[in-house]
Image (tube, coloured by chain):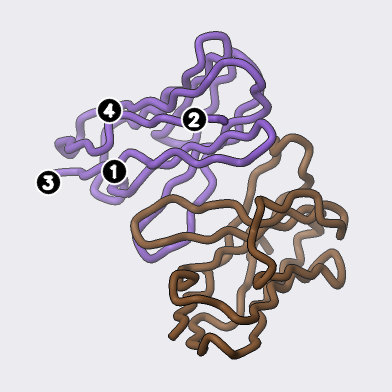
Amino acid sequence: DTEVTQTPKHLVMGMTNKKSLKCEQHMGHRAMYWYKQKAKKPPELMFVYSYEKLSINESVPSRFSPECPNSSLLNLHLHALQPEDSALYLCASSQGDTQMSYTQYFGPGTRLTVL
Amino acid sequence: ILNVEQSPQSLHVQEGDSTNFTCSFPSSNFYALHWYRWETAKSPEALFVMTLNGDEKKKGRISATLNTKEGYSYLYIKGSQPEDSATYLCALRDDKIIFGKGTRLHILP
């Protein structure tokens, strides 16, 4: 099983809503990533969890709050988002995070629209 | 700040022809380089991870080389097929993970 799953596929939320994005993998990977991708642009790294601990936070605003409850799950909690946060949010996982020398497997993404 | 450049931005290749394109980066602070194949409305698909100077990787008709001393990697596609049409992204890490803007490959029938 080389699949990374993400739910929901699509999400529409207002600026006052609180919602969560979920990512799951059962490949035994110990590193998981959140990326933000705007239309026709490459992904931008947001967060990296390595062995369930936050190892990289790319100066992401606090309205995005990641959580890694266990080694298979990664959540992204959203609160008070802005319309410019509308994007495709991609989750990825890899065997480890040692200087990014492991292949990353991407999920299909959650397309988020903030009204 | 790590700057990852990919060239050309766009490429049109006749079906059956071979082609190659480049990912350039500062040669210092190199950890690993990734190549991805990215189709519109899909997530990036990993092709190669390269870490050592002189690395050569191959997957079917696609291969890649890495020169960390001069700061570039080439991706080669032999005998292009319509299904090769996609954007090819490279990504590097030093303290950050940075993606290049990609080379958009169009295969002409």
Q: Chain of mark 1?
A: B
Place residue B17 in its image quadrant: top left
Q: Earlier in the sequence, mark 2 or mark 3?
A: 2
Whether label 2 touches label 3, CB < 8 Å: no
Q: Chain of mark 2?
A: B
Q: Earlier in the sequence, mark 4 or mark 2?
A: 2
Q: Give the Cα distance between marks 1 and 3.
A: 16 Å
* Mark 1 or 4, closer to the camera: 1
State the residue in front, B11 or B5. B5
The residue shown at (27%, 28%) is B19
Q: Position of residue B24 (x, y in %)?
A: 44, 23
Q: Earlier in the sequence, mark 1 or mark 3?
A: 1
Q: Which mark is residue B109?
A: 3
**Amino acid identity at mark 2:** Asn
Whether label 1 touches label 3, CB < 8 Å: no
Residue corresponding to mark 2 = B3
Residue corresponding to mark 1 = B104
Give the brown chain's letter: A
